């Protein structure tokens, strides 16, 4: 369940190790979500926000995709891989893991 415990519930050692499960269980969140902002500059701080999305950190519109797969990771389907703006036409039912860091 990672360093902070943001894994999906099936990957956590128990609900006690899942920060999100514990906060949801104690109704501490406005919404059952978290958002991550990773700064590219020394002039602003990276942050994780629980229960909300900070729109001031967004560079484009937000779009939602379903978490798919059975491995237990934050996996999403992708249409294809692009290199230099050109689709490579190599994906059929391709999934990628969305992760800010990993211990594996």
Image (tube, rainbow, N blue to C red):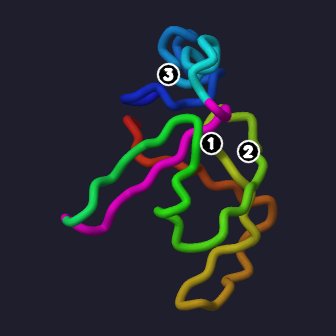
Q: Magenta segment, which residues? A: 30-42
Residue under the image location 55 percent in, 19 percent down:
23
Location of mark 2 (residue): 67
Residue under the image location 49 percent in, 63 percent down:
56
SS category of the residue bearing label 1: loop
- Circle number at residue 83: none
Q: Is residue 84 left or right of residue 41?
A: right
- Residue sitting nearer the eye, 62 or 66: 62
Crowding at mark 1 (Cα within 10 Å: few <14, some 14-19, many 20+): some
- Circle number at residue 74: 1
Whether residue 23 appears in magenta in the rendering, the answer is: no
Crowding at mark 3 (Cα within 10 Å: few <14, some 14-19, many 20+): some
- Circle number at residue 19: 3
Alpha carbon separation for disc pair 2 and 3: 19 Å
Q: Position of residue 78 (x, y in %)?
A: 72, 64
Q: Nearer the viewer, mark 1 or mark 3?
A: 3
- Whether pointer 2 and pointer 1 mark residues with C-beta atoms closer than 8 Å, the reply is yes
């Amino acid at each position: 369940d990672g360093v902070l415990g943001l894994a999906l519930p099936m990957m956590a050692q128990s609900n006690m190790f899942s920060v999100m499960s514990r906060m949801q269980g104690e109704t501490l969140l406005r919404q059952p979500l978290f958002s991550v902002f990773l700064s590219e500059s020394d002039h602003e701080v990276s942050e994780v926000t629980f229960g909300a999305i900070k729109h001031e950190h967004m560079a484009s519109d937000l779009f939602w995709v379903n978490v798919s797969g059975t491995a237990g990771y934050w996996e999403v389907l992708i249409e294809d891989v692009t290199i230099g703006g050109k689709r490579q036409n190599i994906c059929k039912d391709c999934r990628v893991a969305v992760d800010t860091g990993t211990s594996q």
